[in-house]
Amino acid sequence: MTEVAVGAKLTLERADFPGLFSALAGAGYEIVGPTVRDSAIVYDRIHGVDDLPVGWTDKQDGGKYRLERRADAALFGYNVGPFTWKKFLYPAHERLWTARKDGTSFTVAPEPVDGPPLAFLGMRACELAALDVTDKVFQGGPVVDPGYRTRRARILRIAVQCAQAGGTCFCVSMGTGPGVRQGADLVLTEIVGDGPHRFLLEVGSPAGAAVVARLPSPPSASPKSDERVAHEIVERTARSMGRHMEADGLRDLLKNNLEHPRWEVVANRCLSCTNCTMVCPTCFCSSQEEVPDLDAEKVERWRRWDSCFNLAFTELHGASVRKSGLSRYRQWMTHKLGTWHDQFGTSGCVGCGRCITWCPVGIDLTEEVAAIRATPGATAGKGGKT
Ligand code: SF4
Ligand code: SF4
């Protein structure tokens, strides 16, 4: 195996891309990446280049998503779909522990967390930023989620810089993309239509270097011209964002406008379907339930994803704290863009646009923020991107 330095910039030819799959398998990783299913690009176990969405792209707008054929055979020529990486770190339905009767008491056994290390192939800059956010939520405070911590410690992050912006993307507004700045073990920039189909491959960590060292055809050092092309690709993407949201003073703007008439307008459209929270890479609310067996020998505790849009989610002493759609939408948006800062020191939004695309009635948080901001007398407060 060849020695590979962290920070190395290499050129990986398209013809040699299958070698990345064998290198990852040789290093003990199962690969999770984008693949086409049910007319969408989703994340699942993949085994080779043919599983990737070769030659597909996605067109997105408020409440709209469709796949279209590209004129080329790009492997990563799409933006983001309805799935996020969180389901591999924080499963949608998970047993947490089992208690078994032990004489007059119970013995509680936490659920073991097993499975191979996973290579996340195709993470976008906004998704790396979302991973930073969920790290803060699940393992950044005094109480750590053991399942998340164990799974998170085993992943390899292979990022792809976006070569196009989706119709609902606004990562530039949130300062999370489209260029990958940190947090990836390997970073790929796909160069297609400018000479031979190839990738700029940047090595971000020793774990990434170990995988590159296993490539069957060692990549060459990249010419400066490829670095320039990659830079131009990211710049072009940044200039073509589908959405924009003015993030300065957002926390105070929302806090100062809790009785704004706009909440009623949006509540009249909102179906409380929970889609926006299910597709969001940072939403983390869950419910827990105890499931006893019939002979009272054993009880299991299960956790499943839940949503602040569900009426029962805030049920206390027989009544919900947020009875109206207005209060539930307001809670979601003010938490996501405002009070998340107080809890976790960061915004809860990375600008991926999924909640806009997958809202069946096209409710758009960038539009709602703009409407509130445009109201005479709406005060944003001072300060940075809060
Ligand atoms: S709130 Fe919407 S745009 Fe922001 S991270 Fe969640 S899904 Fe993406
Ligand atoms: S904002 Fe849209 S996606 Fe979210 S709960 Fe309401 S209707 Fe569903």
Image (cartoon, rainbow, N blue to C red):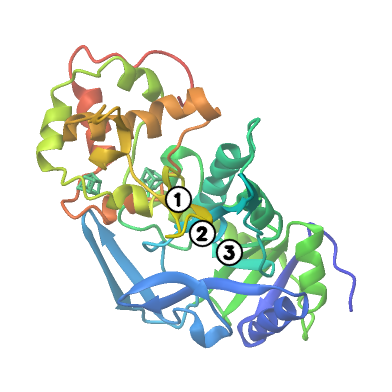
Q: Which residue is mark 3?
A: 229
User: Residue 311: x and y, percent?
Assistant: 23, 39
Cα distance between the residues tagged 3 and 1? 30 Å
Evaluate if marks 3 and 1 touch, with contact meaning CB atoms under 8 Å apart. no
Cβ of mark 3 under 8 A from ligand 1? no
Give the vertical position of 6 relative to 108 (above or below): below
Cβ of mark 1 under 8 A from ligand 1? yes
Give the vertical position of 345 relative to 119 (above or below): above
Residue 247 seen from this side: no
- Badge nearest the viewer, 2 or 3: 2
Residue 130 seen from this side: yes
Going from N to C along the chain, the mark reached first, 1 or 2, is 2
Classify mark 1: residues with Cα within 10 Å, few (<14), some (14-19) or many (20+).
Answer: many
User: Residue 354: x and y, percent?
Assistant: 34, 53
Q: Amino acid at mark 1?
A: Pro
Residue 325's label in the rendered image is none
Q: Amino acid at mark 3?
A: Val
Going from N to C along the chain, the mark reached first, 3 or 1, is 3
Q: Tell me the SS state at disc 1.
A: loop
User: Residue 300: x and y, percent?
Assistant: 51, 54
Evaluate if marks 1 and 2 touch, with contact meaning CB atoms under 8 Å apart. yes
- Going by the image, does 50 lie left or right of 307? right
Classify mark 3: residues with Cα within 10 Å, few (<14), some (14-19) or many (20+).
Answer: some
Q: Amino acid at mark 2?
A: Trp
Residue 85's label in the rendered image is 2
Q: Tell me the SS state at disc 3.
A: helix
Taking depth in this image into account, of 276 and 102 the one nearest to the observer is: 102
